[in-house]
Image (cartoon, rainbow, N blue to C red):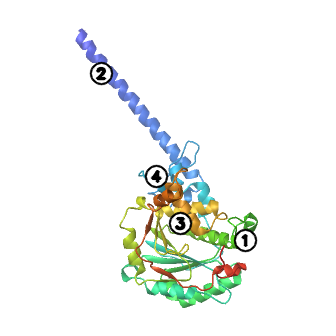
Amino acid sequence: MSSRSRVVLLKIGVVAAVLLLVANYLFLLQNVVKKINKLEKSLPGKELAKSPAQNESYESDGSRNIRDHFPAFFKNNYSRVEPPSIVASSFDVQPKWVRGKFKKQPRLLLGIPSIARNNEDYLFETLTLLVRKLSEENLNQTVFLVYIADSDERIGLDRAHRIQQKFQKDVDEGRIMLISPPNVLMPDWEDKLFPNFGDSISRVKWRSKQNLDMKYLMNYMIKNYDPTYFLMMEDDVAPADEYDRLILKFAAEKPTDQWTYCDFTRVGGAGKLFHRDSMRDFALLLEIFWNAQPLDWLLWDLVRGKKCGYSDKGDECKEKRMLLIRRYTREIFTHKGKVSSRVVFGLQAKETR
């Protein structure tokens, strides 16, 4: 055999060996992928995934990637899914009772926590105006999730019954849904309060209960309906005509990775619009700091943590924060209530710090 023939045979042998190694590698890789998929299915929270498109990513210890904890902080193109520990403890909220059911995933969901103020109840008028002033084009894409937050269950059930009677058509059509708090709001939550900022313990209790109510509303919404946009509302406001059209048009003018929330009124937590990622970020912030600050202050902290450094001074930090807050040119919602929910906690209706 000539030396040239031996070289050819040697090359063929090398190529065959390489192909065999590649085949073995692909076979092993296929088995690894199967085992990973099997492991994912056995992990807690897997059954709560919203759709097959939401692929789950895990670290070596079986926990989901940190990017999934705070999706709005990262711009990479990745599949979003909630961490199992947070899904189990927070997003998996079970109200004591539910009235109505949304028929499909909404584009715009308005979340309205509500509590009766002694002899005043603004919810009926607010809900009437919100439904009446919807535009025709978004009528079937906009829904209202009302969280009846009364501590007295008898009062809450009575209010829910009267709302269901007044808005029977909207409840039946899947436009309005009513939920209650869970059986236990939070074990010993009143023992976890601590006064700060010069607030009385009654005021701390009032603002902390507001945060808990919004936390549970958002967690229930995220797990069960996952809307494109979430509009945080109060139960004593009046909207502008076709407010939904104005809001959705404004929200669509910039990509969601360029803003955290849109502001359509300057009062409290009403009229704040979140996109799908930022609503999760805020729900997680409420999970941790529900007893530390008022709701509107936590909104500022949400964007401060994303934009401001430790060395940034007040004005400099404010400028940076406003890069993530989009304010509409005028207020779309007007505050109408004259009696604050703080009276339920023994505070004056207009008490200041």
3D distance between C-alphas at marks 2 and 1: 85 Å
Element under label 1? Answer: loop
The reply, left or right, for residue 2 in relation to residue 246 is left
Of the numbered discs 1 and 3, the one sitting upstream in the chain is: 1
Of the numbered discs 4 and 3, the one sitting upstream in the chain is: 4
Circle 1 sits on which residue? 200
Residue 82 point in image, percent of width and height: 54, 57
Q: Are marks 1 and 4 in contact (CB under 8 Å)?
A: no
Circle 4 sits on which residue? 74
Q: Are marks 4 and 3 in contact (CB under 8 Å)?
A: no
How crowded pointer 3 is (Cα within 10 Å; few <14, some 14-19, many 20+) is rated as many
Circle 2 sits on which residue? 12
| Amino acid residing under circle 4 | Phe
In front: label 1 or label 4: 1
How crowded pointer 1 is (Cα within 10 Å; few <14, some 14-19, many 20+) is rated as some
Residue 15 point in image, percent of width and height: 32, 24
In front: label 1 or label 3: 1
